[in-house]
C-alpha cells in the first residue's frame, strides 16, 4: 500500500504543474526568504499553496511555554491545502506555516480555488491523491512517534526525511518530541 502511495505522488505533482500553467492568472508566484510566515495562527484561511522550490514547516505554538510543536514539513512540489470550501467562512487558522529554506511558492486565493474546482474536474482527482500523501506523512509521523528511544527515532527520521540538511536541531527535536540537546548530540556523532 505505501509503495502505491509513493508512486502516485509524481503523477499528482505533474498534474498540478499542468493546471498552474493552464490557469496562470489564478496562481501568484512569489519568492520567500527563510523565516517568513506564510500563514499565522489566528489569521483567516484565504489561500492554498504549491511549493515550486524550497521548504516549509507547519507548527502550532504551545500557549503555556510559547514553544513550537512542529506538525509537518513540505518540500518542492508539495501542495499545501489550508483553505477548503466546505469549511465555515472566515475561519481562523489553528496553525502556522513558516518558510525554512528560501522558496518560490505559488498561492491561489479561496475564490480562485473554488472557480478552479469547477473548471477543472481533474483537480478533484489530484486532491484525492494529495490526501493519500497527507495520510502517508501521518503514517511516517506515527511510525516515528511509537519508536521507544530517542536515538532510534532520530535514525528513522534521518532515513526517511529529505529535509535534514535544512532543519535546525530545534525543528527536528520538536518534530521527534525529544530535547534539542539530544538531537545536537546525535548530529555531532555523524
Image (spheres, rainbow, N blue to C red):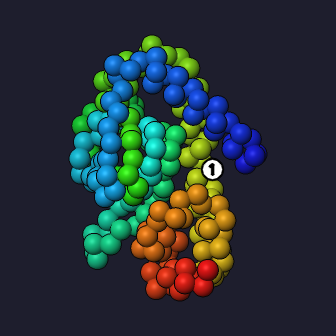
76 sits left or right of 46 in the view: right
Q: Is residue 103 visible?
A: yes
From the top left corner, tell me how far across and down residue 16 is, in percent.
52, 28
Local packing at callout 1 (Cα closer than 10 Å; few below 14, some 14-19, many 20+) is: some
Q: Which residue is mark 1?
A: 136
From the top left corner, tell me how far across and down residue 167 is, in percent.
46, 65
Please report the residue visible at 60 percent of the width from the left and 74 percent of the height from the top: 154
2 sits left or right of 165 in the view: right
Q: Does 51 sit above or below residue 62?
A: above
Q: Residue furthest top?
A: 119
Please report the residue visible at 69 percent of the width from the left and 42 percent of the height from the top: 5
For the N terminus, the image quarter is top right
In this view of the protein, which residue sits in the foreground, 76 or 41? 76
Please report the residue visible at 48 percent of the width from the left and 57 percent of the height from the top: 72
For the C terminus, the image quarter is bottom right
Q: Which quarter of the picture shows residue 162?
A: bottom right
From the top left corner, tell me how far across and down residue 82 is, in percent.
39, 41
Q: Does 178 sit above or below residue 62?
A: below
Q: Which quarter of the picture shows residue 95?
A: bottom left
Q: Is residue 93 visible?
A: no
Q: How many marks?
A: 1
Q: Does 41 sit above or below residue 106?
A: below
Q: Does 62 sit above or below residue 76?
A: below
From the top left corner, tell me how far across and down residue 93 is, in percent.
30, 48
Please report the residue visible at 65 percent of the width from the left and 73 percent of the height from the top: 155
Query: Circle 1 sits in a helix, a strand or a loop, which is it?
Result: helix
Amino acid at each position: 500500500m505505501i509503495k502505491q502511495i509513493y508512486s502516485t505522488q509524481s503523477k499528482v505533482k505533474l498534474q498540478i504543474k499542468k493546471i498552474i500553467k493552464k490557469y496562470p492568472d489564478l496562481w501568484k508566484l512569489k519568492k520567500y526568504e527563510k523565516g517568513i510566515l506564510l500563514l499565522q495562527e489566528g489569521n483567516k484561511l484565504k489561500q492554498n499553496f504549491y511549493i515550486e522550490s524550497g521548504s516549509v514547516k507547519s507548527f502550532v505554538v504551545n500557549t503555556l511555554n510559547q514553544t513550537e510543536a512542529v506538525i509537518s514539513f513540505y518540500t518542492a512540489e508539495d501542495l499545501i491545502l489550508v483553505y477548503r470550501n466546505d469549511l465555515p467562512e472566515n475561519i481562523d487558522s489553528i496553525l502556522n506555516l513558516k518558510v525554512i529554506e528560501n522558496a518560490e511558492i505559488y498561492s491561489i486565493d479561496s475564490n480562485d480555488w473554488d472557480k478552479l474546482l469547477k473548471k477543472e474536474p481533474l483537480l478533484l482527482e489530484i486532491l484525492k491523491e494529495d490526501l493519500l500523501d497527507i495520510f502517508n506523512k501521518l503514517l511516517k509521523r506515527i511510525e516515528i512517534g511509537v519508536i521507544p528511544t530517542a536515538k532510534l527515532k532520530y535514525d528513522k527520521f534521518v532515513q526517511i526525511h529529505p529535509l535534514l540538511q535544512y532543519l535546525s536541531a530545534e525543528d527536528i527535536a520538536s518534530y521527534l518530541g525529544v530535547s534539542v540537546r539530544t538531537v545536537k548530540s546525535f548530529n555531532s556523532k555523524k
